[in-house]
Image (cartoon, helix red, strand yellow):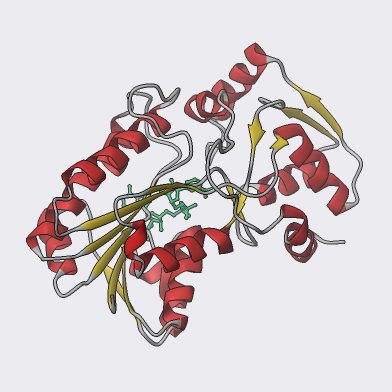
Amino acid sequence: MQNICILGGTGFVGRHLVNRLAEQHLNVKVLTRRRERHRGLLVLPTLQLIEADVHDPVQLSRCFQGCDAVINLVGILNEKGHSGSGFRHAHVDLARKVIKACLDNGVRRLLHMSALGANAGMGPSHYLRTKGEAENYVHTNAGKELKVTSFRPPVIFGPDDSFINRFATLLKISPILPLACPDARVAPVYVGDVVDAFAAALHDPSTYGKRYDLCGPREYTVRELVQYTAKVMGVKRLIIGLPKTLSRLQAAIMEYVPGKPLSLDNYRSLTRDSVCKNGEPCPTTLESVVPQYIRDRHGR
Ligand SMILES: NC(=O)c1ccc[n+]([C@@H]2O[C@H](COP(=O)([O-])OP(=O)(O)OC[C@H]3O[C@@H](n4cnc5c(N)ncnc54)[C@H](OP(=O)(O)O)[C@@H]3O)[C@@H](O)[C@H]2O)c1
C-alpha cells in the first residue's frame, strides 16, 4: 500500500490523515474541487494535489490509475433544499462511482468514512440514511479483490473542528445560549484517534470487510459539552436547553442563517444518541486536548 488516493483529503479529518500518511512516506494523491484553496498541503513532500470532479466517472477512473488504496472521506452535513438528493449524490452515488473506478483500475484496498448511527432503513435523517446506504453499498459490491473497511465515528473533535470551536464562538458572542437537543448523548472522538484507525487499517488484513464504530472514552450530553467549553474559556453564560418543539423551530430558522449552523436534517440526526454500544473506545479524552486549542483559538 504505497500509492494512496484520497477523496475529501482537504477537509478537517483529511488534513490530519494526509499528514499522518505523509509521515509514513506514502505517496498521497489528494483530489479536490478547488486546488488553489488548499495549496498549503503542498508542503508535504510526497503529496500530489489534483483538481478533479470526483463525480465524473472518467476523471475518477483516471485518478485511480496506479493506486494501491483509495480512501473516501467525502461527506456533507447540509444540502441545498430538503429532498435528500444532495446527500444521495454526495454519499451514495459517489460510493457507487468509487467502487466502479476501484474495480476498473485494480485498486486492492478501500477505506470508507461513514458515521455512527448510519442506517439505510432506520436513520432519522437524510444524512444518516444515505451514509448507511453508501456504507452498505461499498461492503456489498466490492467483490473479492477489493478489500473494504468502513469507519463510523460520532462527532469528531480536534484543533480545527467545527464542533467545540462552534460552541466557543457562540459562547464568545452571546451571554445567553438557547441550546437545541440539550439532552442528546454523544461520545466525541479525537481526530488523532480516527486518523490512527485509518492509518493502521490500511495495512492490516484483520480489518478487511469490517465496520468500526469509533467512539471516544466518555459520553456527555450536548449541554455538558457546552458547559465544559464555557468553563475552559472562563466565561459564565446562561445556557437554556430547548424542548423538542423549540429545538426543531430553532433548526428551521437556522437553515436561513448564512452557513446553515443548524438544519432540520441536523436536528433529526440529533434525535438519536450518538454513543457506541460495541467495541473498545478510542483512548484520547476531550479534557486532555480541548483546553489547549480553545485557549489558543479563543483566548484565555
Ligand atoms: N467531522 C465530524 O465530526 C464527522 C463525524 C462523523 C463522520 N464524519 C465524516 O467524515 C468525513 C470527513 O469529515 P470532515 O469533517 O473532514 O468534512 P469536511 O471538513 O467538510 O471535508 C469534506 C471534504 O469532502 C470534500 N467534499 C465536500 N463536499 C463534496 C462534494 N459534494 N463533492 C465532492 N467532494 C466534496 C471537500 O473537498 P474539496 O472541497 O477540496 O473538494 C472536503 O475536503 C465525512 O464523510 C463526514 O461525513 C465527520
Query: Residue 207 location in percent, x, y?
Result: 36, 57
- Quarter containing the N terminus: bottom left
Query: Between residues 187 and 49, which one lies in front from this camera angle?
Result: 187
Q: Residue furthest bottom?
A: 45
Instruction: State whether residue 33 appears in this view.
Output: no
Q: Is residue 122 above or below residue 21?
A: above
- Quarter containing the C terminus: bottom right
x 26%, y 67%: residue: 69
x 77%, y 65%: residue: 292
Query: Residue 4 location in percent, x, y?
Result: 29, 72
Q: Is residue 102 above or below residue 186?
A: below
Query: Residue 284 location in percent, x, y?
Result: 67, 59
Q: Is residue 147 left or right of residue 118?
A: left
Q: Residue furthest top?
A: 245
Q: Is residue 11 left or right of residue 285?
A: left
Count the labels in the image: 0
Query: Between residues 117 and 125, which one lies in front from this camera angle?
Result: 117
Residue 114 lies in what quarter of the image? top left
Query: Residue 276 location in percent, x, y?
Result: 56, 38
Instruction: State whether residue 219 appears in this view.
Output: yes
x 7%, y 60%: residue: 104
Q: Is residue 149 above or below residue 115?
A: below
x 79%, y 59%: residue: 291
